[in-house]
Image (cartoon, grey):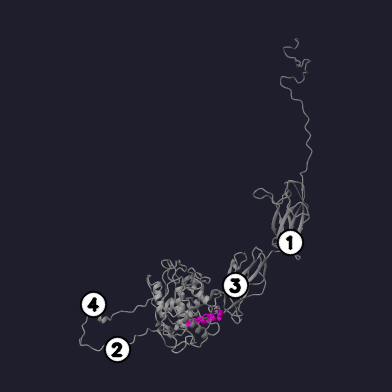
């Protein structure tokens, strides 16, 4: 393909010097802010390589609007559309006749001009010329297949590139469920400006006011292309930015060269042709690939009266004598529908989203305490290039991932519309539990306009902590203390939601945690907990339960502190358990006599008991 393109370049391209001169003429004709002459580097060796092309946010296809889809490589002829006798560098106006290659279908040209006016109104620093859109439109789709569009600018049939399945092209899996390209497996470039669906989802526009963002509509597609080329603060009057913009559309230096050549060609002059009669290009960058759906085909349907059939031989001429052939008739032009575009001289109505040039952040300080609603709403003002307010602009407010603040219903992003004063006001924002500063980002969807609003969440404060009740806090070792209640106040008012830190210390003069004093129970490892974070309730009260005395008797202090200066010191006493004297032992009793012993017989001197009288020993009568 390189050899083929080199042959076409030698045959049809102008030299780099002429490109520079022609673009200089275009700059002169457009006045301030026009494009300067490009370099004479037409070899494709751009100062920024194709891999360095910048890509606006949302640009898919690995960094290009088209997913690096195939494009037409036809180049304009050497005979440029300049009027005879006019110097190449002199400003020219569009001519009404000229080479077929210089003709642009009426509706397509109107769409390019409208897109230029819209983008220049909203982003004048970009310096977008409609001839650049025409160059891209020529290379991408042959100006919407020669202008085959209806009265609203929509193509008569969808223009689809090949499936980006990685077979000779980029590999891009389906991103739109076939909504734009009809392919639920892979993405395809769509429409006269050949956007891939993922890029169109970000940059798509409704430029013809029909309520739809249609990539197959030339008005919508041309305006989206203009905004895409201007993204990232590019100034197309700077050669490097111009190259980057084109390369962001298709990352190929050959593509860059082809677009620049048509850009220069159209800059020398052009004319309108009826819709549907524009010249169609032939050669595409995938000329050895599969189907080329945009190649024109000529109808070859024979006349029914002369078509031979099996049962009817071809008719013989009734007069075999030679006759003078009839003069060829002019080919009939396909019917065209007058596009619904504003007549010449009628001001173009520019959508609010394109008229806005800047978002001015509101001046109100955005502050709140934790778990409360911000007193002021986040606002920005949409203004045009002259500083006038713009109503009807969609503005998106987005919270960073680091904050737990939320818009209503827990939303992290909301989109609102600016009012008659140009003010876009976000709904009420509620702070979470985290006290920290963060930044709210406001932007216009589809534009590179942003503004930042600083917000701060502060902790709740109490400048006084006081105990409710005065009963002594005493417990024996290992015993439980009674429940303790305190009130937090700020400027005399009860202070709900205040975080209070409680620490058991050894004395009123110490803030260090005690090693032996009471505790708030034990942790999972069995270690005593002597520091605890508590919070006042909705009534500003704080209850301390589960405080347990340690094993060492003594006097300790419970130190409580709150943001804002509130402090309380409560004395905790640990006592030893009360001691009682041991009980007196009971008097001992003599052991009970055994059955062999007589309870009344004294022991004999020899230690044996005296024998008691019995029948055998009693005296006889």
Which is more foreground, mark 3 or mark 1? 3
C-alpha gap between disc 3 and disc 1: 38 Å
**Distance (Cα) linking label 4 and label 2:** 29 Å
Kindly report the distance in space between the C-alpha atoms of the residues bearing marks 4 and 1. 105 Å
Q: Quadrant of the C terminus?
A: top right
Residue 118 located within the stretch drawn in magenta: yes
Q: Quadrant of the N terminus?
A: bottom left
Q: Earlier in the sequence, mark 4 or mark 2?
A: 4
> How many residues crowd around disc 2 within 10 Å: few (fewer than 14), some, or many (20 or more)?
few
Look at mark 1 in the image and give the residue it sits on. Answer: 488
Residue 473 location, x and y as percent?
Answer: 77, 52
Question: In the drawing, does residue 617 fall left or right of residue 209?
Answer: right
Q: Which-is-in-front pick, marks 2 and 3?
A: 2
Q: Give the x, y percent position of residue 270.
A: 45, 85
Which tag, 2 or 3, sits closer to the chain's start?
2
**SS of the residue at dot 4?**
loop
Q: Earlier in the sequence, mark 4 or mark 1?
A: 4
Instruction: Establish if 586 lies above or below 612.
Output: below
Question: For mark 2, what is the residue?
Answer: 327
Q: Are marks 2 and 3 in contact (CB under 8 Å)?
A: no
């Amino acid at each position: 393909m390189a050899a083929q393109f080199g042959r076409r370049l030698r045959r049809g391209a102008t030299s780099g010097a002429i490109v520079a001169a022609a673009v200089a003429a275009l700059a002169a004709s457009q006045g301030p802010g026009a494009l300067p002459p490009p370099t004479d580097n037409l070899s494709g060796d751009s100062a920024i390589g194709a891999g360095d092309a910048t890509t606006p946010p949302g640009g898919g296809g690995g960094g290009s609007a088209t997913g690096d889809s195939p494009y037409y490589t036809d180049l304009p002829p050497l005979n440029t559309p300049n009027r005879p006798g006019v110097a190449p560098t002199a400003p020219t106006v569009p001519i009404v006749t000229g080479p077929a290659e210089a003709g642009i279908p009426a509706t397509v040209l109107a769409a390019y001009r409208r897109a230029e006016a819209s983008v220049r109104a909203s982003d004048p620093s970009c310096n977008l010329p409609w001839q650049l859109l025409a160059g891209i439109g020529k290379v991408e789709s042959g100006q919407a297949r020669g202008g085959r569009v209806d009265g609203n600018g929509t193509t008569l049939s969808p223009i689809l590139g090949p499936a980006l399945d990685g077979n000779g092209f980029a590999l891009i899996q389906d991103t739109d469920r076939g909504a734009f390209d009809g392919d639920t497996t892979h993405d395809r470039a769509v429409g006269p400006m050949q956007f891939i669906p993922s890029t169109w989802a970000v940059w798509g526009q409704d430029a013809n006011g029909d309520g739809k963002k249609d990539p197959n509509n030339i008005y919508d597609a041309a305006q989206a292309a203009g905004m895409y080329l201007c993204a990232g603060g590019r100034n197309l009057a700077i050669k490097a930015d111009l190259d980057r913009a084109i390369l962001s559309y298709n990352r190929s230096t050959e593509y860059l060269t082809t677009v620049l050549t048509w850009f220069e060609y159209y800059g020398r002059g052009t004319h309108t042709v009826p819709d549907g009669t524009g010249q169609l290009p032939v050669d595409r960058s995938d000329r050895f690939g599969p189907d080329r759906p945009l190649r024109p085909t000529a109808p070859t349907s024979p006349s029914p009266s002369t078509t031979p059939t099996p049962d009817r031989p071809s008719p013989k001429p009734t007069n075999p004598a030679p006759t003078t052939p009839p003069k060829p008739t002019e080919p009939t032009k396909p019917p065209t529908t007058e596009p619904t575009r504003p007549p010449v001289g009628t001001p173009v109505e520019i959508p609010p989203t394109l008229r806005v040039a800047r978002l001015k952040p509101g001046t109100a300080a955005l502050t709140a305490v934790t778990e409360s609603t911000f007193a002021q709403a986040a606002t920005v003002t949409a203004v045009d290039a002259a500083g006038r307010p713009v109503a009807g602009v969609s503005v998106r407010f987005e919270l960073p991932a680091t904050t737990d603040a939320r818009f209503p219903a827990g939303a992290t992003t909301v989109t609102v519309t600016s009012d008659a004063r140009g003010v876009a006001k976000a709904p009420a924002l509620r702070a979470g539990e985290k006290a920290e500063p963060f930044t709210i980002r406001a932007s216009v969807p589809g534009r590179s306009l942003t503004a930042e609003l600083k917000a701060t969440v502060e902790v709740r404060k109490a400048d006084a902590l006081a105990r409710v009740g005065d009963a002594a806090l005493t417990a024996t070792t290992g015993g439980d203390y009674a429940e303790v209640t305190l009130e937090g106040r700020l400027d005399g008012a009860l202070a709900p939601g205040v975080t209070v830190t409680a620490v058991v210390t050894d004395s009123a003069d110490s803030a260090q945690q005690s090693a032996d004093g009471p505790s708030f129970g034990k942790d999972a490892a069995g270690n005593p907990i002597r520091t605890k974070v508590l919070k006042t309730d909705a009534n500003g009260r704080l209850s301390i339960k589960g405080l347990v005395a340690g094993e060492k008797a003594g006097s300790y202090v419970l130190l409580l502190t709150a943001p804002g200066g509130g402090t309380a010191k409560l004395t905790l006493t640990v006592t030893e358990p009360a001691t009682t004297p041991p009980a007196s032992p009971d008097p001992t009793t003599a052991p009970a006599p055994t059955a062999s012993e007589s309870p009344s017989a004294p022991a004999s001197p020899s230690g044996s008991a005296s024998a008691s009288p019995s029948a055998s020993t009693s005296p006889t009568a």
